[in-house]
Image (cartoon, helix red, strand yellow):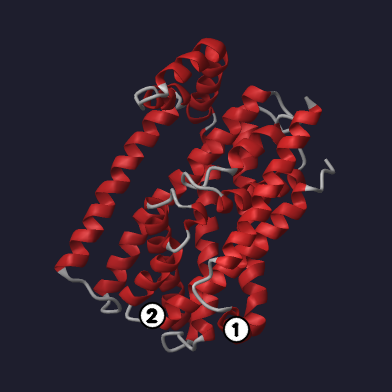
C-alpha cells in the first residue's frame, strides 16, 4: 500500500510539472514581451507573490477548523502539514480540469496518513464545499459593493449591468439553497445519484454503492454533523475562506498602484482602489468558474481579467498585464507546491 501511495504521489508530481510546461508554452505573448512585463512589475512581484503566503494560511486555518470540527477534537496533525497540503492541493487544482478538483484526491491520500480514511475523505469534501460556498458569498457581497460604488457615482449603472447583477444574485441564492441541502443531508449520495444518470456510468455507480455503502453513509453523516453540531467550526471556516479572497484582491491592487491608479490617493482613494480590486477578482473568478472545465483555465482567466478591468473603465492593456503577472504567480506557486510535495516531514 505504501508503494501504491508513493507511485500516486509521483503521478501527482509529474502532473504538476507537466502543467508548468504547458503554462509556459501557452502564454499569449512572446518570452521577450513576458520579460518586459516582469521588468515593469519589478519589486512589486515580491508583495504580489508574497501575499499568497497569507491567502494560503487563511485557507489552511479554514481547513484545520473543518478537520477539528469533523473529528470533534484537536486534529492530530500539525498546522505546518495542513499548510503544506493546502499549497500542494491548490497547485494541483491549477493543473487539472473539471473545476480544479485535482488536488482533492491527493489531500485525501495524504490526510489518511494522520486520521482514518472516512474522516479524511469527509474533511476534504467539506473543505471543497466550503471553498466553493465562500466563492458564492464573495460574488454575492461583491454585487452590493458594486451597487454602493455606483450609488456614489464611482461606477456606471445601466439596464444591462442591472440585469447582469440581478442574474448573479439569483444564481448565488440558488447556490445557497443547494449548499444548505448538501450541508444538512450530506452530499456523496446525491452526487452518486447524479452520476448514475450519466450514460455509461450507471453500472459503475451501482458497484461503488454496493462496495462502499456503509462508508458513504458514514461520510454523509459526518458532513451533516459538522453543520448541525459544530456551527462555530462551520462559520469560522466560512469567514476565513471569505477573507482569503479579500486578501487575494490585494495582488490586483498592487498592480493597479503600479500603473498609478489610486483614485486620488489617500485613505479614501486607496479604499476605492481596493474595492475595485475586489470587484475585478470577483468577476474574473466567476467567469473562470463558469467555464472551469478547461485545464488551468487557459485563456478564461485572461479574458476575465481583461473584461472585468475594462468594465471598470480601465484599459485593456492593464487587463493583459494583470492576467500575465497572475499567470506567472500561479506558475511560481505550482513549482513551490511540487517542491513541498517532496518534503514529507510530518
**Which residue is label 2 attached to?**
316
Residue at image position (53%, 34%) is 126
Q: Give me the C-alpha separation between circle 2 and circle 1.
A: 20 Å
Residue assigned mark 1 = 32
**CB under 8 Å between callouts 2 and 1?**
no
Residue 298 seen in this snapshot: yes
Q: Please, what secondary structure does the residue beneath circle 1 have?
A: helix
Residue 232 visible? The answer is no
Seen from the viewer's position, the closer of residues 301 and 182 is 301
Image quarter in which the N terminus is found: top right
Depicted 312 relative to depicted 95: above or below: below
> In the picture shown, does residue 32 fall above or below 58?
below
Residue sitting at 38 percent across and 80 percent down?
A: 316
| Residue at image point 77% right, 41% down | 78
Residue drawn 67% across the image and 24% down it: 117
Mark 2 or 1, nearer chain start:
1
Say left or right for 342 vs 30. Answer: right
Amino acid at each position: 500500500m505504501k508503494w501504491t501511495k508513493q507511485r500516486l504521489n509521483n503521478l501527482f508530481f509529474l502532473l504538476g510539472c507537466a502543467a508548468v510546461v504547458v503554462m509556459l508554452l501557452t502564454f499569449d505573448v512572446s518570452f521577450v514581451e513576458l520579460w518586459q512585463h516582469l521588468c515593469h512589475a519589478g519589486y512589486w512581484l515580491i508583495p504580489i507573490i508574497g501575499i499568497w503566503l497569507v491567502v494560503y494560511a487563511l485557507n489552511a486555518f479554514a481547513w484545520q477548523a473543518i478537520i477539528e470540527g469533523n473529528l470533534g477534537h484537536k486534529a492530530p496533525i500539525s498546522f505546518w502539514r495542513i499548510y503544506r497540503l493546502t499549497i500542494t492541493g491548490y497547485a494541483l487544482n491549477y493543473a487539472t480540469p473539471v473545476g480544479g478538483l485535482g488536488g482533492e484526491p491527493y489531500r485525501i491520500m495524504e490526510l489518511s496518513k494522520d486520521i482514518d480514511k472516512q474522516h479524511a475523505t469527509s474533511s476534504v469534501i467539506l473543505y471543497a464545499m466550503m471553498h466553493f460556498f465562500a466563492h458564492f458569498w464573495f460574488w454575492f457581497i461583491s454585487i452590493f459593493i458594486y451597487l454602493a460604488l455606483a450609488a456614489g457615482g464611482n461606477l456606471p449603472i445601466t439596464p444591462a449591468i442591472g440585469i447582469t447583477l440581478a442574474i448573479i444574485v439569483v444564481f448565488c441564492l440558488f447556490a445557497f439553497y443547494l449548499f444548505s441541502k448538501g450541508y444538512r443531508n450530506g452530499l456523496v449520495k446525491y452526487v452518486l445519484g447524479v452520476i448514475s444518470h450519466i450514460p455509461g456510468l450507471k453500472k459503475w455507480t451501482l458497484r461503488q454503492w454496493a462496495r462502499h455503502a456503509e462508508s458513504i453513509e458514514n461520510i454523509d453523516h459526518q458532513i451533516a454533523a459538522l453543520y448541525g453540531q459544530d456551527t462555530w467550526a462551520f462559520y469560522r471556516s466560512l469567514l476565513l475562506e471569505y477573507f482569503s479572497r479579500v486578501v487575494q484582491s490585494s495582488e490586483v491592487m498592487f498592480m493597479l498602484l503600479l500603473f498609478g491608479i489610486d483614485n486620488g490617493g489617500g485613505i479614501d482613494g486607496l479604499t476605492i482602489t481596493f474595492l475595485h480590486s475586489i470587484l475585478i477578482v470577483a468577476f474574473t473568478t466567476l467567469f473562470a468558474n463558469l467555464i472551469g472545465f478547461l485545464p488551468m483555465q487557459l485563456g478564461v482567466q485572461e479574458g476575465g481579467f481583461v473584461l472585468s478591468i475594462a468594465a471598470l473603465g480601465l484599459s485593456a492593456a492593464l487587463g493583459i498585464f494583470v492576467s500575465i503577472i497572475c499567470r506567472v504567480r500561479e506558475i511560481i506557486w505550482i513549482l513551490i507546491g511540487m517542491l513541498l510535495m517532496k518534503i514529507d516531514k510530518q
